[in-house]
Amino acid sequence: MDISQARQKLYNLIKKEALVKKKVVLASGKESSVYLDIRKVSLAAEGSVLIAQLMWEQIKDAACTAIGGPTIGADPIVGAVLYHSQREGRPLQGFIIRSAQKRHGMMNLVEGPSLAKGSSAVLVDDVVTTGGSLKAAIDILEKEGVRIEKILAVIDREEEKKFDPEKYAFSALFELSDFIDR
């Protein structure tokens, strides 16, 4: 399926399955009358494949060796893109950043294959409002010597400037305004 068809199918799927019009409190603490529950799509087979195809298109030529992001929004996206990268003959490593360090076992904050100092990664998330969880992920990775090549989201809520454009390339497959009837 070509990219424009995949984008349209994903848009239709998000609008049908993930769009909720009711008052909610977002992770940022802000109130909204529109909520996009992307996990309803990213954890469904068709949605997972479409997200992976569209994100892969944006990173396939990037100088990255890994893809990951904050749990739980990034989890299904990372898995789908990893599968897609393997099928495309350019396998990436995956990682997930916990919201808090484990207090048992290996006590990891970053789960997955070890990321080498100097490696580069793409960060992903389902929905970005203020970018708080991604900013925390950036801090963790940069302390480990990992360079952030690109930041991708399924939805940008368009609420504010999230990342310094001189330092980080950020894009989203869709903006919140794509789903609001005018």
Image (spheres, rainbow, N blue to C red):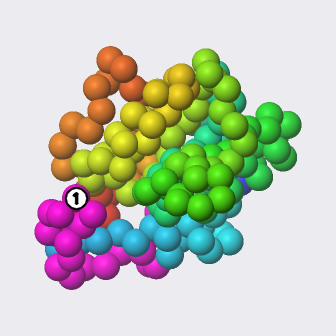
Q: Residue at x 32, y 17 (%)?
A: 166
Report the side of 148 relative to 57 (left or right). left
Q: Residue furthest left?
A: 31
Question: Where does residue 92 sit, x and y in percent of width and height?
Answer: 73, 38
Q: Residue at x 43, y 42 (%)?
A: 137
Instruction: Pick whichever, 139 or 34, lies toward us.
Output: 139
Q: Which residues are magenta?
A: 11-32
Q: Amino acid at mark 1?
A: Ser
**Residue denoted by label 1:** 28
Residue 23 is inside the magenta segment: yes
Helix, strand or loop at mark 1 = loop
Residue 97 is inside the magenta segment: no
From what the image shows, is residue 168 above or below residue 18?
A: above
Quadrant location of the N terminus in the rendered image: bottom right
Question: Where does residue 175 sit, x and y in percent of width and height?
Answer: 33, 52
Quadrant location of the C terminus in the rendered image: bottom left
